[in-house]
Structure formats: structure tokens, C-alpha cells
Amino acid sequence: MVLKVDNIHAYYGVSHILHGVTIQIKRGEIVGLIGNNGVGKTTLLKSIMGLTRVRSGHINFQDQDLLHLPPFKISRLGISLIPENRDIFPDLTVYENLLLGMTNSRRKRKVIGDKIHDYFPILKARLNQKGGTLSGGEQQMLAIARGLVGEPELILVDEFSEGLQPLVIRNIVGILREVQKEGKTILMVEQDARLALHLSERIYIMEKGEISYHGLPEELLSNAKILKDHLAI
Ligand SMILES: Nc1ncnc2c1ncn2[C@@H]1O[C@H](COP(=O)(O)OP(=O)(O)OP(=O)(O)O)[C@@H](O)[C@H]1O
Ligand SMILES: [Mg+2]
């Protein structure tokens, strides 16, 4: 297992959000996490990244205990979060935004050059343009590129598809599959259950801060009742 989250309880201040969440991910898997608004999906990704208060349970990444490590150390161990609101710096150029993803590597210029060339030709032409002048789809590409340039082992992707055109979504799906082929592991939170089922090898469903279902996409596709029982759709 590359990631083991074992029975964690996470809080914002005194608000108790995750109530004993357990998930496990194998190296090279794409795993989907779906669930209604506000159930705690983003909180789980933030907890893995060290951005919430986890008061009990364990989080283990490549046999290292992540609990109580600061986010920058977790990032250096090889985990990156592509956040739901993208968090692009509008006044920095595309290139400068990408540099912020380079915590993990000394070969900055070359890695940025190669990755962008392979996966993000749209950004390559815009390296000196300010992040804030990009379209929504381009900003999401930039957020993903920034999450990948540091060459993480585990990529946490939070609702990348939100607000994007189908063509851009297909493009990003293609990139995520390529990244998986390189042997990387992806945990993907997605509002669009159909997209999550299409892209993932296993699915977790979260309800009210707990995992209420765990199974294969085929199982969910052939039994619509499961989705109905766990999601407001
Ligand atoms: N910084 C915060 N401080 C306090 N409460 C928060 C904070 N962030 C989120 N919450 C609360 O925690 C709960 C879970 O939020 P979270 O963002 O994890 O949900 P989500 O499943 O990602 O929802 P969505 O699908 O809308 O993105 C919600 O009740 C939310 O109001
Ligand atoms: Mg969320």
C-alpha cells in the first residue's frame, strides 16, 4: 500500500468533520472518492496533506507516519494536492506559478520544460503570461501542471472537472491516465460520479464524514440503487 489512512478523526477548531475514515490505496491505482456536498471529501485530502487537525487515527505514506508533519514536509515526501479552487497566483506568470510546485526537484528549468512540452502545450505558449489572464480551463491546467512538476508519487486531485468544458475534461483525463502509466498513484475527489466511475479502478463513497461504501465502479454501474442510496442523485 502506498497510502493507508486508518480510522482518522479530523477537526476544524472544535468542529468534528471526519468520524473514523479508513482508506487504502495501492501504488499505481486511480481511486475515486465521491459524495454529496459538505460530507468531508476535501477535508480528507487536506488531512492527508497535513492541513487539518487530526486528533486520532493514523496516516501512513510509503511506510512513513504523516501525522503531525507540517504540509511542506509531506509535500517533499512526494504528495501533491491539486486544490478544488485551483489557487493560481494571478499576478505571477505561468512559469512562476509552476516554480512553486518544484519543492521536490533541483532540475527546475528542465523538468518544467519537459513536462509542459509533453502534457500541456497550451501552457507552453503562455509561460510568461500572468496566471490571472488565463481562461478557467487553462487555470485548471496550470493547477494540474503545478501539482505534477515536482514529480510526486501520490497526487490528490480535488474536483478538477468543475466548471470545465467537456473537451478540456477529456484532455485532463488523458493526462491523468498518462501520469498513472508512469506508475504514479491518484486519489481523485469528484462531484461528477459518472466521471469518477469512468476514470477510477476503485470507488469510495463518503457520507457525513464517514466512508459508507467501498467497491468497484462496475458494481456501481450495474446497480444504480447503490448510488441512489448513498448520493443525492
Ligand atoms: N476551514 C473550515 N472551518 C470550519 N469548517 C469547515 C472548514 N472547511 C470546511 N468546513 C466544514 O466541514 C464540512 C466538510 O467540508 P468539505 O469541504 O470537506 O466537504 P466536501 O465534501 O469537500 O464538499 P464539496 O463537495 O462541497 O466540496 C462542511 O460542513 C464544511 O462546512
Ligand atoms: Mg470539496
Image (cartoon, grey):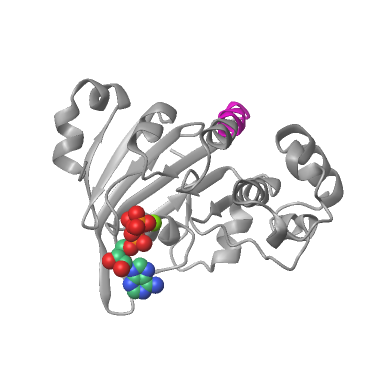
Q: Looking at the image, which residue is at 52% across and 43% down? A: 164
Between 127 and 39, the one lying in front of the other is 127
- Do we see residue 55 in this rendering? no
State the residue at coordinates (64%, 61%): 88
The image position of residue 22, as x and y in percent, is 29, 49
Q: Nearer the viewer, residue 150 or 231?
A: 231
Q: Residue at x 56, y 57 (%)?
A: 86
- Magenta segment's dominant SS is helix
- Quadrant, the N terminus: top left
In the image, residue 142 above or below residue 46: above
Q: Give the range drawn in magenta.
A: 174-182
Lateral position of residue 134 relative to residue 155, left or right? right
Identify the image quadrant of residue 24: top left
Q: Quadrant of the C terminus?
A: top left
Say which of 176 and 180 sits in front: 176
Q: Where is residue 151 in the image (x, y as percent from the top left)?
A: 67, 44
Residue 161 placement (x, y as % from top left): 48, 43
The residue depicted at 46 percent of the width and 47 percent of the height is 162
Q: In which quarter of the image is residue 197?
A: top left
Say if 184 sits above or below 62 in the image: above
Q: Does the magenta stretch include residue 150?
A: no
